[in-house]
Structures are given as structure tokens and as C-alpha cells.
Amino acid sequence: MLTEQTADGDFDETAISQRLTDSVTGVDGVTALAPSLRYIVATATARVLRRSGGVPVGVDVSRTAGGVRVRVDAHLDDSRPVTEIVDEIFAVIEVDLVAGTEEPLGELEIDLRVVTRGH
Amino acid sequence: MSGPNDGSGDLPDPGEVELEWNSDSHLRDVIDEYMDSFEPGPDDTAGVRERILKIVREDIRRGPATRLTTERGNPFAIADASVRSIVRDAVDAVDGIRARSVEVTPAGEPQGSAAEVSLTVAMRAGVSFTPTAEVVRTKVAEALVSQLGIPATTIDIVAEDVYVD
């Protein structure tokens, strides 16, 4: 169940990002995800402050005024058409976000980029 | 990035979502949120955000991409290099033809549900252009559908050079 909400009912973007990272990586044809913005920030902060970085995640999830925005940079293989993989990624994200979420999410905006397509 | 502070970089569609997502304002929000989460000491905060922002700007740089749409209406972007590689491989598979430049432009309704292809090629001396160009069109169209999942509306071919094996 997707119930990554903090005790005061806030939408826990970090926990959901981690969960979606696992789901999207499991889609056939997805070989890897590029680091999410939060992870890049965590890594940059770690470099500047000489601390340990965050847990690698490949999906950025954030609340917007009207709903939820998800950003994914994906590396694909050539096992099937790109659009087929894209549609499955969209479906996985939609199902995963909605399932178990107790409050209406509003409009879901998915910003998906195929970074590479390899063999 | 094209400028030190605008965050737009050499992005293909600076007016679109990408710019908003990569804007310094958004990056600062994410950095502030992250910094707040571990409560850095006073020595950690001076100038730190700007140094982090500089690193993040460099790391999030995305190359040019083609914006397409699946049959189900799901929009996505794919690196230009990946799309061109599909076309280039299809062209190079035709005997006597070598791909030079390749351009793939979103087309169709909704925008990006199809693609217009323009390419220049080099031909082996003695190859008849007209029938070979049809073979190239067929191969490119097949490759776009089978590998990308996007049909081609037009495939323009210009022979710009002749080579001898």
C-alpha cells in the first residue's frame, strides 16, 4: 500500500519517490534510471559538506498546486518499442500513486525522458 | 548551461516544463528543503547553497531531445541521439547508402504522435537513386514503428555525395 504520509498527513515525497523508483525500474525494458533531482542535491550537498549522501532514487515526486508531478529520466534497452515501455511506465506510476493513497491526488503530471536506448 | 544563473542551459524547448523544473528557483527550493532536513550547523550554511546549486546545475544538464506522444496519448521526450541512431541504422542497412545528417521532427495530431524525417545520404557510385530511396523510406518507416513505436508522416531524402568502394 502506498501510504507514505507523515504523521500530520503531509504527502511524503521522498518515500513515494523511493517506492516509484523500485516500480519503474521493474518495468521490462527499463535498464536504469538517472539520478533524481533530490538525489543529485543530496550528493552535491554531501560533496560540499563532506558528509554522506542520500539513498539513490531515480524518480522525483512533488506536490503541485493542482496535483502531483513525477519526473523520470530512464535508460531503456531495445527489447520492445519505446512507446510500449513508456505506456507501461505511465501505468505503473499511476497505479502506484493512487493505490493506498488516502486523499485525492489531483492532476498527475509525468515528465518522462528516455535518456538512452541501448542493446 | 547557457548562462550562469538562468538554469536554462542548451535545452531544446526552453519554454516548456523542463525549464521550470530546472529553474534556479525550483532548484533552490529543493536545496532548501534538503538542507532543512538535516539541520546543518552555522558553519555549514554560509555560501553552501550557492556551491550546491552550482554543482546541481552541472549535474542536471540534459541534452537535446525530441518530444513525442504514444498512441495512448502519453507524452515523453527521447534523446535526439537515440532517435537518430534508429534512423541511421535503418539507412545504413541499405546496400549502397550511407546516412549523413538525420533530423526527426515531431508531427501528427496530437503533436508528437508521428514524426517527419529529413536525411541526407551518400550513395555508392552506380546505385540508382529513385528505387533505392524507396527502399530507404521503407526501412526507416519500419524501424520507427518497430523500435520507437511512432509512424513517419514524411521521409525526405537528399543525396549529397557519391562514394566509390
Image (spheres, coloured by chain):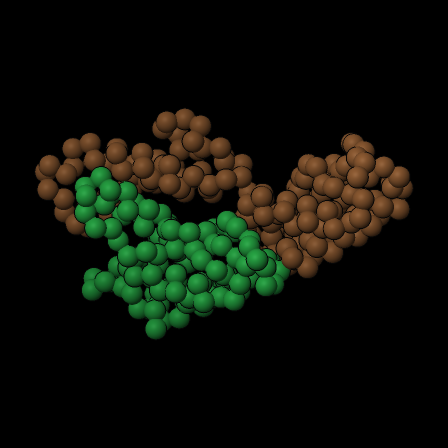
Q: Residue furthest top?
A: B3
Q: Residue at x 27, y 64 (%)?
A: A5
Q: Residue at x 28, y 42 (%)?
A: A44
- Give left or right: position of A84 versus B9: right
Is residue A11 at all visible to an observer of this figure? no
Q: Position of residue B50 (x, y in %)?
A: 26, 33
Q: Residue at x 35, y 56 (%)?
A: A57
From the image, state the color of chain B: brown
How many numbered tags mark residues here? 0
Q: Residue at x 58, y 43 (%)?
A: B80
Q: Residue furthest left?
A: B42
- Give left or right: position of B34 versus B96: left
- Give left or right: position of B92 versus A76: right
Residue A115 in the image: above or below residue A81 = above
Q: Residue furthest bottom?
A: A1
- Give left or right: position of B51 versus A89: left
Is residue B64 at all visible to an observer of this figure? yes
Residue B27 in the image: above or below residue B138 = above
Q: Quadrant of residue B145?
A: bottom right
Q: Which chain is green?
A: A
Q: Position of residue B159 (x, y in %)?
A: 80, 35
B91 or A111: nearer the eye?
Answer: B91
Location of the C terminus of chain B (image quadrant): top right
Q: Position of residue A38 (x, y in %)?
A: 32, 49
Q: Position of residue B96 (x, y in %)?
A: 81, 44
Residue B158 in the image: above or below residue A15 = above
Location of the N terminus of chain B (image quadrant): top left
A95 or B152: nearer the eye?
Answer: B152
Q: Quadrant of residue A96?
A: bottom left
